[in-house]
Amino acid sequence: MAEYRGTVRQAKCRSTFYGSRIPKNTGLSPSKQAYDTFLRQISAFKRRRKYHRYIPVNPVVLRGRTKSTFTRITEALEHFRCSLGLGLHVFYRLVSEFITVPSGVKYYPLREIFCEDSIAYEQFIFRLGDVLPWITDLIERDFSRNSESEKVMKFCDELAKRKVSVSQVTFRSKDWYCSCAIREIGQKKGWNEEELLERIGRFYKRRIKKITPEMVLTDLIYHELDGIDIRVAEPRRRKRERIGRTKRPTHIDLIKKQDWYGDWLKEYKESIEHEKG
């Protein structure tokens, strides 16, 4: 159990751009209802996504080693939840949404999530440690007012224009909070919303694979967008801006400046008139 608990704590307390995250003493204690709540929230999430092409709704059945691993992970998650100061149901509702891969197009089989030697297990744990500490403060925010919800949805529309998929952004979902956290981190970095969106647009301009708010948030956390050059290229000068500049002489201009040019031109014109006459 200590091994699992240490894994979650290490991911949660990494160094950030404004200091290290220190576990809180929130006064919460692990709940005996955590196991049942976690399983119910996984089932509820699958039911909400029952029309999704790649997420079939199957009964959640855990046996043998998968069940024992699930128990140990839940014990570690309980300590994680208490350090974040989140309620039992809202915490596992959000955790259940991480059973999908970051792009959201399919979900990890539960037998792989709750298996010590699988890549899905490591990704699941580290995604929780990366994302949840950044959205914890937003969970208690009042989004019931139309003005607050409209701001979030308007920001999501701007993300959609920059190749970020917001199709799974529903009210108070994981990606809803991730979208809010993107704005918050942009402000902490000293960027206004226009500059933040410009950096996102340039960073993902050539991306082909699906991008979600969670992926954008993770890239922001690890400073991937800090080095984006958003300077506006200086436009080319138009022809009318070149008026008054010294024109480079052509070979015809050089011939006209010769001493013999005047006599030659006079003789040439006289020969033309003679031929016409």
Image (cartoon, rainbow, N blue to C red):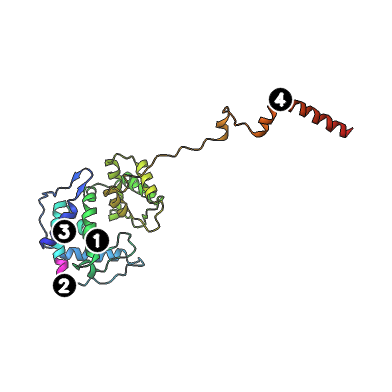
Q: Nearer the viewer, mark 2 or mark 1?
A: 1
Residue at position x 29%, y 41% in the image:
187
Q: Residues within 10 Å of mark 2 (few under 14, many from 20)?
A: few
N-terminal of the two: label 2 or label 1?
A: 2
- Residue type marked 4: Asp
Residue 225 covered by magenta stretch: no
Q: Residues within 10 Å of mark 1 (few under 14, many from 20)?
A: some
Q: Which residue is mark 1?
A: 123
- Image spot of residue 146 (x, y percent): 32, 46
| Outermost residue to the front | 260
Q: Which residue is mark 2?
A: 65
Distance from Cα at disc 3 to Cα at disc 4: 92 Å
Q: On the rendered image, what quadrant is the C terminus found in? A: top right
- Image spot of residue 186 (x, y percent): 30, 43
User: What label sits on residue 259 in the rendered view?
Assistant: 4
- Residue type marked 2: Arg
- Image spot of residue 163 (x, y percent): 40, 53
Specify the principal SS of the magenta part.
helix
Q: On the rendered image, what quadrant is the N terminus found in? A: bottom left
Are the residues tagged 3 and 2 within 8 Å (C-beta)? no
Q: Secondary structure at mark 1?
A: helix
Where, by quadrant of the figure, is residue 254 drawn?
A: top right
| 26 in relation to 60, above or below | above
Which region of the structure is painted magenta? 66-71
Can residue 32 be seen here? The reply is yes
